[in-house]
Structure formats: structure tokens, C-alpha cells
Amino acid sequence: MTATSDTIRLTTAQAIIRWLSNQFIEIDGTEMRVCGGGFGIFGHGNVTCLGEALHGVQDTLPLYRGQNEQSMGFAAAGYAKQWLRQRFMFCTASAGPGTSNLLTAAALAHANRLPMLMLCGDTFLTRLPDPVLQQMENFNDPTFGVNDAFKPVCRYWDRITHPAQVIQSLPAALATLLDPGDCGPAFLGLPQDVQGWTYDYPTVFFEKKIHRVRRISPDAAEVADAIALLKAAERPMIIAGGGVQYARATTELTGFAEAHQIPVVETIAGRANLLNDHPLNIGPIGVTGSDSANAIAEAADVILAVGTRLQDFTTGSWTAFAKDAQIISVNAARHDAGKHRSLPVVGDAKMALTQLSDGLDYQTPATWVDFAQSERRKWNAYVSENVAYGNRPNSYAQAIGVVNALCDPRDRVVAAAGGLPAEVTANWRTLGLGTVDVEFGFSCMGYEISGAWGARIAQTEREADKDTIVFIGDGSYMMLNSDIYSSVLSQKKLIILVLDNGGFAVINKLQNNTGNESFNNLIADCPTIPEPFGVDFEAHAAAQGAISETVSNPAELGEAFMRAKASDRTHVIVMKVDAYEGWTTEGHTWWEVGTPHVSASAKVTAAHEDWEASRAKQRKGV
């Protein structure tokens, strides 16, 4: 094929980057690139060709240098969350371990339905130099390699074996990234030789294209069925999930609840759908929830679930609801809309709530609303007591209360895995809509700092004068902390609170709650550690370029937090908290975990019997 005025000769890598540079999205009347740039670590599998292509677009697709491929993926997830899935980042990694390091991040994005594009090196298509450095050989199928491991954790997967294939593959990948019902990570395997091969591409392929996130109108019959069910309700409630924010439907959610006086509870991903003081906000639901939300969930006869995949922490492993309660599930994803005998309303939450409200001539009985609000007042009193500090051990809840009282309403809070998701979910009092990111879709320790770095990049594109605040335990910090250095290098300031309880304290708590002795979770309880000692987190953070300090108590934490607010770069505050005292003990539903049916320990056996006693409440999935 010979290049003409209608074609342009490019390498495969150059074509990918040129095409990405010309894809735009319209957000609230403003056009911007749908891809905000990327995170990259170069190796032999991506530096020579993809790196060459990226060098020429540094102003339009900025490339942030990562410290670890997994953390790059977490940063891309944090970026996508901050932009409500309307924009994404790519991650590029070399062939072999560089790419395989992205697997956990891909799984996180998949579980959370987040857009992330992976442009990863692959082995040579010609196989002339095989086996090459870092190639994983499959003896019976030479086409099967490390990159195939991404198939279960991606919504779209392709291996580019000819330059022309990107003409089809790139639009298909982008369509997946922007599809509300099928959103998730997309993976393109790029063999090292194919990256550099040329093709005469049609110039029209690179013309500017403006995209919009599609809103799917729900089926009229499904809406009618939902309205009929709601009209018959005596004790209705709304479960508001993260999908409400992704649909930009918080206004419609509030309007619907107010028009029909229906109490609202929030999932972990749905925290900050309503402000804390809204009279119909009854609190967070589920295993890490509130007594108030779980009290009305247990009594509700009709449950309108909006934008939630109804995972076990929301449903209390399906013990949180009455067995005869009817669920209406509004979701853009068909897969999520039909769970547990739900009446599905498949479509956009913003449109669905509007259509439901327009057709619903109904208000909830006042006695039900009074009950819900009475329960919330009791929960508010508990939280106030829980976050207070004085003559008792330092706790996560106290640290959360201090920051909550001093932060700006538009500051973003990030937490993940370990004990802090439960403590933030239960104790954080929302000051601004969409300001809380508790990563519990994949419950991934190590997300906190990296996800916050990605969120901060996005935040500086929107609200540069606000802060990104990280709550992280010492266990998660030790798993992944190198993006403190990334944040300092890129001048994306974070405020990081390292709350040190001496190990994996929340799993130690679960261990003890199931009758087991403390073992291998707290540093002090590891038999392979002859002389336990703590990490100097202040010195470690300072070594990465951050301002850092250690405080002794919540009062000092408040003073340090205000210094962090005023500082010009990433500021790390370290405080020890008790591993055993100060946990939020109220508000939890039952959670199904595997416990030993037989044990030599009477404590373990008794705990198993006690745990199983709640199974009678479990709603079956059929």
C-alpha cells in the first residue's frame, strides 16, 4: 500500500497515540481530551516504539513516571473516580513483570467498574528471537502468555498482531471505557516488533472526535412496574450506590427522596451522595454501616437500590433485609440490575429517577419517616461520642473526627482496605457531595496513596485549591508508599495521615472475633520476628521528599493538620492508635466468613456456632 494524500504512514505505536490525542469528550458543555494522559514505566517492551510516540505529545498527553506498575494502575483508578468515569488515564508497562504487576490494578478497576486503558508490551509476533527476556513460555500453546492473564480482569482485551487492527480495536476499547453498563479496564497487548511496524492509515481515522457518555433510557414497562410496587409500599427505602455519582444524579436522588419522603441509606461507594445533615439521610448501610440504616433495612418492605451492585458489605451477606422485602434495582448494567429477585430497571439513574418520580403519586407514611429519623438521631449521638477524645486510647475514629471538623467541604478523602474503610464509612460526616473515595470494591490495601495521587492529578484539573486527604494504616503504608515520592516529584500535594496500630489490626480483630488467638497479624504476634520494632514513618516519608511529623494525640493531630493544609507540598502526619481499643463497635450487620466447623479450640467452636446462628436470616439468591 502506498501513502497518498488520504493516508499517513505511521508506526502502530504512533497511530495509537495520535488517535488517543484526538479523542475528546463533552462535559457540562466543555470539550476536553477524554484521555487525561498516562502513567508509565519504560522497559525494553515499550520504550523504543511507544516511548518514541509519546515523546512527541508531552503537552497533550502528559506521561507521569510511576514507581511501580501496580501503583500506576491504582492512580489511574483514582483519577477515573474523581472524573466520575468521564475521563481516564492509560498505563503503559513493559513486557513481562512490568505488565504482570498491573494485574491487581486491573482487577480493582474491573470490580469497581472503572475505565483504565493498558498499553502493554508483548513478545515478538515473528518469534524470530524466541524465547526472549521475560517471556513466559507455554510449551503447548506459543500464543498463550502473561498478557492472557488479563482476560478475566478486563472488559476489553486484544493483542495487536497487525498495524491495521488498531483501526477497529481502539474505537472498540474506548466504547467500553465510556459505556456506563459495561465500563471497566481495556487491555491492548502490543508485541515489540508490531509496535514499530508501519501502515498507511486513512487520515480520517485521526480526525477530532467528540464523545459523550451515553444515557440509556429505561424501559417504560420496567418503570411502570417499579412505580406500581412503590405505590404499594408502606416502609420504602432507597439504597444509593456509587452509580448515582457516576450518572451525575445526586440532584435527582435528593429530589426524588424529598418529593416522596423516602429515607435514603448509602453504600460504601455511595458515601457522599447526600450531605450528612440532610433529614432523609439515614446513614451508611451494611457490615461497615450504621445502626440507623440497618434498622430501617431490616424493616423495609420495598427497597429501591440505585447504582449499586449489592455486594456483601452492603447486604450483610444478604441478612440485612427482610426475606419478603421487594427490591427494585436501577442500574445501567443488566448484570447488576437483576440480582436477588430484584425487579430490574435497566438504564441511566438520572433518567430513571426522573421517570419514576414523574409517575409516582405517592408519599411515604409519616410514621415510617419519623422512625428512620429517630434512628439517625441516635446514630449521630453515637458517632459524636465515638470520635470524641480525652482520657482514652487514640483511635481511627478520633483521627477521622479531627480531620472532619477541620477540612474544607470540598476536600477529597481517600481510604482503602484494612480497618479504615469501616471507620471512615461509619464516622465520616459528609460536608460536600462526591468527596469521599473509600476503595472497597476490590478492598485493595495499597490503593490509598497511589489512588489519591491519581485523584489529585484530576482534582488539580478541576478544583486546585482543595486538598486530597489520605487515611492509611501502617499495614497498607508498608505495602505501597512510593507514590509519596511521585506526588512530591509531580508537585501534586497530598495530606497523608499514617495511623500506626502495629500491623494488620483489623484482621487481628477478625481473628479474635472468630475465637482464634492473635497470630501473624500484629508485628508483636509474629513468631518469626524475634525482636519486634516499629518503622519510623516520619523519617521514611521525609526521605521521599515529604514534609513529615509525628504527633502523640488527636489534639496535636489537629494542629498538625492545619500545618499540612498550609504547606506547599505533600505532608505526612503519623500517629499511633490502639490495636484493640476504640473500634467502632456499633452498626455492623452479620458478615459471612468461613469459620472452622470443627476445632480443637473450644473458643473457635463456640465462635463458629455463634456466627452461624445468624444464618437463619440470610436471604437466598433465588
Image: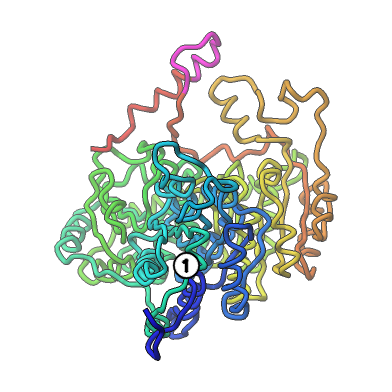
Residue at x 33%, y 32% (from the top left corner): 618
- The residue singled out by tag 1 in the image is 84
Residue situated furthest front in the rendering: 128
Q: Secondary structure at mark 1?
A: loop
In the image, residue 87 above or below residue 382: below
From the viewer's side, name the closer residue of 237 and 603: 603
Residue range of the region highlighted in magenta in the rendering: 595-607
Residue 501 location in percent, x, y?
72, 38
Q: Specify the quadrant of the image occupied by residue 462.
A: bottom right
Q: Quick check: can you spot residue 304?
A: yes
Q: Is residue 406 above or below residue 106?
A: below
Residue 464 picture location, percent across and down: 65, 75
Residue 252 visible somewhere in the drawing: no
Residue found farthest to the bottom: 5
Q: Amino acid at mark 1?
A: Leu
Q: Can residue 245 be found in the magenta stretch?
A: no
Q: Considering only vertical position in the picture, is 616 above or below 37?
A: above
Image location of residue 243, percent across then percent down: 40, 60
Q: Position of residue 497 (x, y in %)?
A: 72, 53
Q: Residue furthest top?
A: 600
Is 203 displayed left or right of 38 in the figure?
Answer: left
Colour mapping used in the image? rainbow
The residue sitting at 31% across, 66% down in the picture is 348
Asked if residue 112 lies left or right of residue 396, the reply is left
Residue drawn at (63%, 20%), measured in percent from left and top? Answer: 517
The N terminus: image quadrant: bottom left
The local crowd at label 1, few if under 14, some if 14 to 19, many if 20 or more residues have their Cα within 10 Å, is many
Q: Quadrant of the C terminus?
A: top left
> What residue sits 51% from the left and 63% below the top?
81
Q: In terms of depth relative to the viewer, which is nearer, 238 or 499?
A: 499
Look at the image and say whether residue 601 sits in the magenta stretch.
yes
How many numbered marks appear?
1
